[in-house]
Amino acid sequence: MRKNIPPSSLARDSRFHRRDTEQRMSDRRNTDVEGHVDPEAEDVAERARRRMHGIFVGEIQALEGAGRTAFDFGTDEVPYELKLDMARQCWDEARHCEISVKLAEHMGGELGEYAEFTTLFEAACHEDPVFRLAGVNRALEGLAIDVFTQMREFGEIMGDPILAYCEDFMLADEVTHVRMGSRWLREVTKNDEQRRKDALAFQRVVDGLFNFQGQRGEEDDSPIRLAREFRRLAGFTDDEVDEIAKMSEESRSATSERNSARHAFDASFAGQSSSA
Amino acid sequence: MIVIKPSTFDKVEFDAERIASYADQARLLVDKGLSDDESIEIDVDETLSTSRVRIKSIEPIRIEVESGALEDYKFPRTLSELDSLVAFSRLFLEVADRRRSDFAAPELDAQLGRAERMAWDVNLYGRVGRLGLRVHMPRFRYDFRNRHGFSDLADRTFDTLWSDSKLTWPEIADLSKRAQDSVNADHF
Ligand SMILES: [Fe+2]
Ligand SMILES: [Fe+2]
């Protein structure tokens, strides 16, 4: 079997339409509004449904990425226990795929309704397994911790026990996946300071990409709220969480001008519009 | 006469002429309440990827849509025929409702509650489906539940709103209110 496959060779049926990260980032519209699952927004259900589809395809790619990492490297390159952890993660992600399909249906979505962005699997294609753990397990599954925490809250606020419980179950698993990333990053690089530094730099690049133009923060109204407590459980230091918050703050000030225009626009819509 | 603003697009791969032709098809589909020589202006906000739509004026018809309302989500930034037809039909049905005195619509600038606005939308999209356009009913059921509770009463209310083409605004608002009253939430 071939090792190190590219994102373009992931197996999908005709319902799925794949887009890479470059195509995703070339959208010059303001796409941060659609990512803000704000119960006050009249189109919040549509925003939540879109996010759920993003979570669903992310789960498929997390399964594929962990499977690849278990397979792509021999025990001369990574500890056997790391491979076992990746296998355990596959089991979790397969379950998350099934939960996400059902949740997407519960939320009135259809599989393949939105394009599939392959960002997660792209990060899982790095030739160095430590970079994969930093980019996928720590950066992107760290993001999953933030997002799932918020979706769980959204379900609670809207009185939707199915969404709230499902997100809670998946969140518990994601904490362990991030922990695996934290553990193996530390252990595999314990005698190679430079490799650890470089992997953490890669993690920052991925985190920066997904700060959603500064939307991540710790304020109550942050579109994506940093789940500091769960991140701590998953092996993040307070300094690391501070750094993500700081990066986000910097990109937020760069986009604040545009956002104030957006808020004015949103206000002009209140009570009059509906989601198409 | 249908005017699309802007006439060319920079951030999305939309074509104003095609949008105008979809709007015209939707006008023909809705038929009642709109005239053949209707003057229609459609403002497309291509800076936002969300899909909100609204009516700014009834006489003449002026509507505003965010780019996501006309977009094929499978192929981001491209125009979707079906989604355009659905969005315009829903807007024109609302125009037709607002023009009928027996419908007793609220004023155009009235601040509707999120739940009652959603109830009217459910009724409009149900009717769009009966015009022969594909609308995915579970999507609207979920949207409705988020504003009326995840309950059997909310589901029964949804079924009525979705399937009855003859409801007036006071009846829609009353159905919405009764479903809201059965759950005690402040986000509706
Ligand atoms: Fe997962
Ligand atoms: Fe995971």
Image: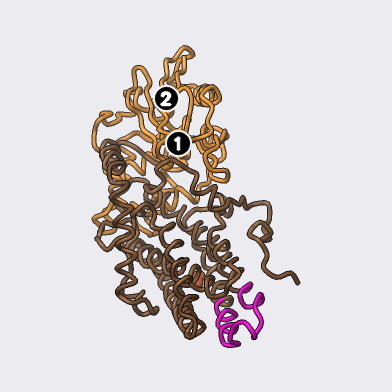
Chain colours: A brown, B orange
The majority secondary structure of the magenta stretch comes to helix
Residue A79 colored in magenta in the image = yes
Q: Where is residue B52 in the image (x, y as percent from the top left)?
A: 39, 39
Start-end of magenta stretch: A67-89
Numbered mark located on residue B67 in the image: 1
Residue B165 horizontal/vertical position (percent)? 45, 35
Nearest to the observer: residue A180 or residue A15: A180
Residue A90 in the image: x percent, y percent?
58, 75
Q: Is mark 1 on a helix, strand or loop?
A: helix
Q: Do the residues labelled 2 and 1 touch (CB within 8 Å)?
A: no
Image height check: is B185 above or below B80? below
- Circle 2 sits on which residue? B42
Task: Find out if the beta carbon at label 2 lies less than 8 Å from the nearest ligand 1 atom.
Answer: no
Q: Label 2's element? A: strand
Work out whether disc 2 and disc 1 sit on a shared chain. yes
Q: Which amino acid does label 2 sit on?
A: Ile
Q: Is residue A53 visible?
A: yes
Label 1: how many Cα within 10 Å (few below 14, some 14–19, many 20+): many
Instruction: Rate crowding at label 2 as few (under 14), some (14 to 19) or many (20 or more) other CA atoms within 10 Å.
Output: many
Q: From the viewer's perspective, is A66 left or right of B70?
A: right
Task: Tell me where residue A250 sits by quadrant.
Answer: bottom left
Amino acid at circle 1: Ser
Ligand 1 neighbours mark 1 (CB distance < 8 Å) = no
Q: How far apart are marks 2 and 1 (CA)?
A: 12 Å
Q: Mark 1 lies on which chain?
A: B
Q: Nearer the viewer, mark 2 or mark 1?
A: 1
**Is residue B148 something that shows in the picture?**
no
